[in-house]
Amino acid sequence: MLNNVPSGMNRMRRNVVINHPNTWECQVFKKTVHRNGEPVVGGLPTLGGAMVLSSEDEENVSWEHIGNGYALQAENFTPASMMDRQDANIGAAEVRYLIEPESPEGMKGHFFISKHYVIYLVISDAVRVAYEVVDIETVMNVSPYATRYVMNRRADLDLLPD
């Protein structure tokens, strides 16, 4: 009975995110690391005496397209550093988005987002701006949770015209 409230909130959130005028189309990608049998210690990769590497240190990676969806910024204005000329702000280092897959849960094409996934906001056919999911948070303490995604800019992964 109690979980009917968050289930209803999740359905309403999905409708708001998909139909809101400020919603961006987005593409979700997952990083896959490819290794060629490097030595391991305790199941983790090593590099000489440096021991364990993070996935950020890997050179041979590929990006798997998980699916398409909709992203709506889910926070009030947050303070941000100003440019030297004080004519614009740089933007917040950390942003929060509500993200909904194109397909509803239980349907083919639905996916769940995890940490370190990269979300491309589709600005135009040629421009996609990259964000990495660094945390997943909720504003409810009852399952099923209404999640929002804390993301950092990944300008190194932006897709821009030449």
Image (cartoon, rainbow, N blue to C red):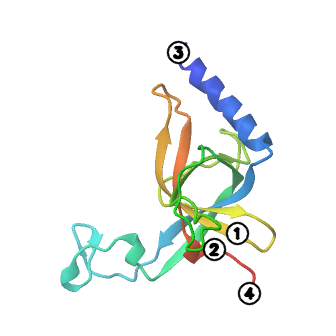
x 80%, y 45%: residue: 21
Query: Residue 73: x, y in percent?
Result: 64, 48
Q: Amino acid at mark 1?
A: Arg
Q: In the structure shown, which secondary structural element does the residue marked by tag 3 occupy?
A: loop
Q: In the structure shown, which secondary structural element does the residue marked by tag 1 occupy?
A: strand
Decide: marks 4, 2 in contact (CB < 8 A)? Answer: no
Q: CA distance from mark 3 to mark 2?
A: 42 Å
Q: Give residue 131's quadrant in the image.
A: bottom right
Q: Amino acid at mark 3?
A: Leu
Camera-side mark, 3 or 2: 2
Q: Which residue is mark 3?
A: 2
Count neighbours of disc 1 (C-alpha within 10 A) and say few if under 14, some if 14 to 19, many if 20 or more: many
Q: CA distance from mark 1 to mark 4?
A: 13 Å
Mark with earlier residue (1, 4): 1
Q: Which residue is mark 1?
A: 128
Camera-side mark, 3 or 4: 4
Camera-side mark, 3 or 1: 1
Q: CA distance from mark 1 to mark 2?
A: 6 Å
Q: Amino acid at mark 4?
A: Asp
Q: Amino acid at mark 2?
A: Asp
Badge number at residue 158? 2
Count neighbours of disc 4 (C-alpha within 10 A) and say few if under 14, some if 14 to 19, many if 20 or more: few
Q: Which residue is mark 4?
A: 162
Residue 99 is left or right of residue 82, and the answer is right
Which image quadrant: the C terminus?
A: bottom right
Count neighbours of disc 2 (C-alpha within 10 A) and say few if under 14, some if 14 to 19, many if 20 or more: some
